[in-house]
Amino acid sequence: MNKWAVILGSSSGFGAATARELAKNGINIYGVHLDRRAALPKIEEFVEELKNTYNIEVIFRNISATDAFKRHSVIEDLKEIGSVHVKVLMHSLAFGALKPIIE
């Protein structure tokens, strides 16, 4: 069974730091972030760093976690991976109004 962490707000700050620490321990990372196009090259470098340094699977999606349809797409992505065990779910979003994330 694959161990995964789902991190909301994974591209910077506490989310990115947590992704790095979990990657060091062999946990695959599924990151959700919402960033402007200009920030994407730096985020792609971070994803490649995690993959290459820690030999894990890393998926980052640039979507709004406040959108119910997009949250559901995260679940569908994880199902497609196969036998996934979500070991960590971290909420590290830091923007906008606080809308319900988990229903």
Image (tube, rainbow, N blue to C red):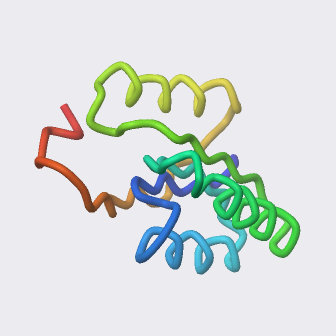
Residue at x 45%, y 68% (from the top left corner): 15
| 2 with respect to 61 (left or right) | right
| 29 with respect to 46 (left or right) | left
In the picture as drawn, the residue positioned furthest to the front comes out as 38
Residue at x 34%, y 39% (from the top left corner): 65
How many discs appear? 0
Where does residue 91 sit, x and y in percent of width and height? 32, 58
Figure quadrant of the C terminus: top left
In the picture as drawn, the residue positioned furthest to the top comes out as 69
Q: Is residue 64 above or below residue 91?
A: above
The answer to which of 76 and 34 lies nearer the viewer is 34
Q: Is residue 24 above or below residue 33?
A: below
| 89 with respect to 10 (left or right) | left
The answer to which of 42 and 81 lies nearer the viewer is 42
Where does residue 62 sit, x and y in percent of width and height? 52, 41
Q: Quadrant of residue 70?
A: top left
| 100 with respect to 42 (left or right) | left
